[in-house]
Image (cartoon, grey):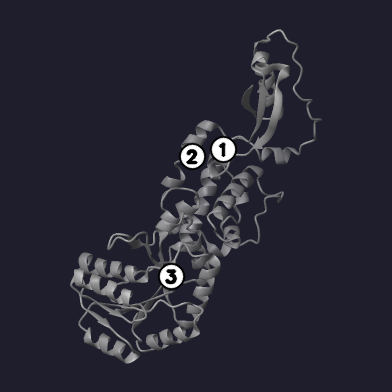
């Protein structure tokens, strides 16, 4: 018994291949409609895969009478408009397009999209005013963003108005992807890192387990080794002895001073002691956002310092629902900028865009490993935009 698979643009074409090679003795095992997956599926033809089996001897019976393996299904009226949405784009063009997302040019400020004109409630794929060919592309982009866990309302905003783009076949692809790419970049471009001349007292806050202490060590290393700044460390994370020792180890390696404080008064004194420093990085205890008592401890600590900057450290691998609860709690405590950690532990960057949209807070740094000081950088909107659209980092 031989089992073979045949494919064709439709069931009839696949069946003809079965008939031509295996003859009327073939047994049809399965008939399956196959649609390629991923953002590039719109360039690949949906096809029908037929699995057929036949006795070895049947293949040699060249003179046997061959009949259709199964009767053809009655023809069904097909809406031309819907049929056109399944159009195929030349395979040669697919090869040209595969590298497009990874080589998108960085838009200038003049090319940034006007967000005031960027609103709609849903993707109007069935709207008679939307070009059908564009609708196919929009749907592919929509699904790709959804796969990267971007919120649906954010996706709807990103694809708003794309159905009206007019292009010449190949240009439609580049135009639509480019517009979405630029819109994502535009939304992520409002970022700010620790700056010279800004507040020198920098607090790091956030829930447990997000890599806050390691992130502080990376920032301290960068400003000490790369910028030549005089940096001091203060930690109030006395709930975890290991955290204090970890930070002390980094301080010894960098040859920078460190103080451990147990109260608001000691924090104030520590800042005064480091008044000649360019930058004072202050580690706070990782606290569950559900613990109201610990939240009040943090509030009292922050109230002691007027000249301050606060960075909320979050793991991009945390579920969006939990990130939402965390940021809402910290919204009640203080104004903050956001650091996303553990980019190396997830393949989906959608939460970066989601939280930026939800909080309106400025983004700052991202971290992507345990190496100090290497695995940290400023947020790069272009990398994130390419990744959520299915490109490479």
Left or right of 188: which side holds 365? left
* On screen, residue 68 above or below 207: above
Name the residue at 55% across, 44% down: 38
| For the residues bearing labels 2 and 3, Cβ distance under 8 angstroms | no
Mark positioned earlier in the residue sequence (2 or 1): 1
Q: Quadrant of residue 202?
A: bottom left
Image spot of residue 27 (x, y percent): 71, 24
* On screen, residue 62 above or below 16: above
Left or right of 24: which side holds 330? left
Q: Quadrant of residue 366?
A: bottom left
* On screen, residue 295 above or below 365: below
Q: Quadrant of residue 228?
A: bottom left
Name the residue at 79% across, 25% down: 71
Left or right of 74: which side holds 259? left
Q: Label 1 belongs to which residue?
A: 43
Name the residue nearer the viewer: 139 or 248.
Answer: 248
Name the residue at 54% across, 58% down: 149
Mark positioned earlier in the residue sequence (3 or 1): 1
Q: Would you call the spot at circle 1 few (<14 residues within 10 Å), some (14-19), or many (20 or more)?
A: many
Find numbered disc 3 in the image and state the secondary structure of the residue it sits on: loop
Q: Label 3 belongs to which residue?
A: 362
Name the residue nearer the viewer: 384 or 289.
Answer: 289
Name the residue nearer the viewer: 341 or 63.
Answer: 63
Cα separation between marks 2 and 1: 9 Å
Find numbered disc 1 in the image and state the secondary structure of the residue it sits on: helix
| For the residues bearing labels 2 and 1, Cβ distance under 8 angstroms | yes
Q: Residue furthest bottom?
A: 265
Q: What number is the disc on residue 97?
A: 2
């Amino acid at each position: 018994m031989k089992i073979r698979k045949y494919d064709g643009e439709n069931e009839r074409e696949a069946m003809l291949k079965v008939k031509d090679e295996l003859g009327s003795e073939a047994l049809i095992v399965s008939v399956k409609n196959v649609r390629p997956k991923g953002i590039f599926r719109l360039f690949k033809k949906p096809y029908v895969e037929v699995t057929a089996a036949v006795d070895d001897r049947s293949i040699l019976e060249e003179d046997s009478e061959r009949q259709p393996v199964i009767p053809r299904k009655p023809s069904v009226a097909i809406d031309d408009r819907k049929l056109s949405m399944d159009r195929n784009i030349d395979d040669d063009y697919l090869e040209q397009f595969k590298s497009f997302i990874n080589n998108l040019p960085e838009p200038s400020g003049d090319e940034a999209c006007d967000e005031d004109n960027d609103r709609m409630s849903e993707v109007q794929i069935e709207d008679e005013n939307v070009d059908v060919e564009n609708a196919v592309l929009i749907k592919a982009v929509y699904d790709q963003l959804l796969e990267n866990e971007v919120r649906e309302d954010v996706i709807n905003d990103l694809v708003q108005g794309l159905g009206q783009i007019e292009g010449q076949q190949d240009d439609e692809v580049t135009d639509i992807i480019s517009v979405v790419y630029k819109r994502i970049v535009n939304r992520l471009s409002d970022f700010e890192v620790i700056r010279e001349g800004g507040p020198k007292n920098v607090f790091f806050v956030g829930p447990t387990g997000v890599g806050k202490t390691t992130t502080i060590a990376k920032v301290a290393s960068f400003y000490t080794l790369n910028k030549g700044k005089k940096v001091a460390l203060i930690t109030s994370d006395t709930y975890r002895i290991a955290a204090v020792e970890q930070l002390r180890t980094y301080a010894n390696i960098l040859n920078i001073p460190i103080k451990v404080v147990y109260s608001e008064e000691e924090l104030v004194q520590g800042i005064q002691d480091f008044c000649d420093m360019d930058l004072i990085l202050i580690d706070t205890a990782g606290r569950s956002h559900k613990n109201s008592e610990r939240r009040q401890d943090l509030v009292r600590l922050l109230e002691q310092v007027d000249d301050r900057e606060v960075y909320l450290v979050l793991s991009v691998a945390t579920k969006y629902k939990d990130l939402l609860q965390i940021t809402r709690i910290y919204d009640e405590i203080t104004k903050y900028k956001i650091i996303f950690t553990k980019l190396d532990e997830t393949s989906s960057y959608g939460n970066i865009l989601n939280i930026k949209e939800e909080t309106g807070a400025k983004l700052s740094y991202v971290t992507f490993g345990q190496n100090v000081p290497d695995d940290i950088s400023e947020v790069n909107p272009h990398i994130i935009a390419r990744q959520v659209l299915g490109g490479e980092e």
